[in-house]
Amino acid sequence: AKSRYIAQNAQSKALHEEAVNVLPGGNTRTILHTDPFPIYMKYGKSYQVTSEDGIIYTDLAGEFTAALYGHSNPVILSAINDVLQNVGMNVGATTAQERLFARKICERFQLERMRLTNSGTEANLHALAAARKFTGKRKVVTFSGGYHGAVLTFSGGQPASNNVDIDDWIVVKYNDLDAAKEAIRSPGVAAVLVEGMQGANGCICGTSEFLHGIQEASSEAGVLFILDEVMTSRISEGGLGALRGLKPDLKTFGKYLGGGLAFGAFGGRADVMAAFDPRLSGYISHSGTFNNNTLVTHAGHVGLTTVFTPEVARRFTEVGDSFREKLNEVTKGTRIYFTGIGTVATAHFLAKGPRHIECADDVEEVPELKTLFWFEMLEAGFWVTLRGFIALILETPPSELERFVQAVQSFTSRHQNLVA
Ligand code: PMP
């Protein structure tokens, strides 16, 4: 499979060989690094992407959830064109549109106040700053394998970034409520930061008991409960938090909510968010040249109001759930298992053990099988990530999802000796 990959993607290989001379490793997004070289995409249209080698793929990676609207949604494109023609790029001033967009996000995700950023990473950093100011404490409880951004990367429980003071972090096992409670109750804790589903760690869902338990323990301890909805805000009209009946003090956002453009936001309780009110003394300065940029505030707003409406959000999650169920049916009795919720999922290739995962750290996977799966799904015309992550695009026709289910089934029968 690897030699076919090399042969079929000669142009990508040539581009990669040049790229390593200007970009360390040839790229600027570590997650996109693949061996022997990455496939270079030339353009995307609707639910498809076309490579520099001229191969058309059905995009199941969905830009790690940011491409919910697809690559050329007409409503989004028209909003962007309208801005380019009639508004201009960034006017360097407060705009009525940012108020409209903010109001929509507050309504949908049950926030009293919110602010815009340019990425989910920044949203989390600012939410933590607010929590620290509000509580006067510094420590943050978070969960091993969790991902909250490029400067807050945790890998194997270790903060991998020198931008963060390691002493400030208490890293606990995901879905371990007792350990989480103990950490939350320890001295000096400002906030607990958690994903309702650990996305980058393999789409591992937090149990309802775990998430509600964290919420309760935080509230008792005067610790702020911050729910990272960067990947999960698509799971219902109000995100995964609303679906689970959670009431976090703060939520953080990113990905598709900017219409497909660079986006982030955070918000929640008015008294906590007052930390950023420049009318108050001692406020936290939160500037950012592009925070209220005209393209995002228009594209994101039209996306939420006319494309990804509450009804569409509900149906989309049903589509995703039934897709994942079908995938788990055709892989029943094998090592392959799909976790996730709604339209986000990850394929796991389990070395042993039950088809039930509560914490990715406990799971042993077969990396060779994962790589083989990736090569073969690419060959079948599906743009999937090496880590097996899948995020659906609204415009993908059901027949393509069905075709993927068949491709997975045929993979399991072709490699019975490996998957059994
Ligand atoms: N939180 C979660 C849960 C994420 O999945 C990501 C990105 N994959 C981030 C935060 C960071 O967002 P961004 O890449 O926009 O900085």
Image: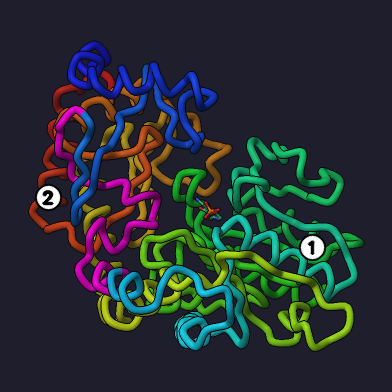
Q: How many marks?
A: 2
Name the image colouring. rainbow
The residue singled out by tag 2 in the image is: 400
Going from N to C along the chain, the mark reached first, 1 or 2, is 1
Secondary structure state at the residue bearing disc 2: helix
Q: Residue furthest left?
A: 399
**What type is the residue that disc 1 sits on?**
Ile
Quarter of the image containing the N terminus?
Answer: top left
Name the spot of residue 193 as percent of width and height, x first. Answer: 67, 61
Name the spot of residue 282 as percent of width and height, x first. Answer: 88, 78
Determine which of the numbered discs, if any, sits on residue 184 in the image.
1
Magenta residues, as a range? 53-80
- Residue 207 can be seen, yes or no: no
Apparent side of residue 390 relative to residue 51 in the rendered image (left or right): right
Residue 201 vs 278, above or below: the answer is above
* Crowd band around label 1 with a 10 angstrom C-alpha radius: few (<14), some (14–19), many (20+): many
- Residue 373 can be seen, yes or no: yes
Q: Quadrant of residue 11?
A: top left
Apparent side of residue 163 relative to residue 401 in the rendered image (left or right): right
Apparent side of residue 354 relative to residue 316 in the rendered image (left or right): right
- Asked if marks 1 and 2 touch (Cβ < 8 Å), the reply is no
- Asked if disc 1 is less than 8 Å from ligand 1, the answer is no
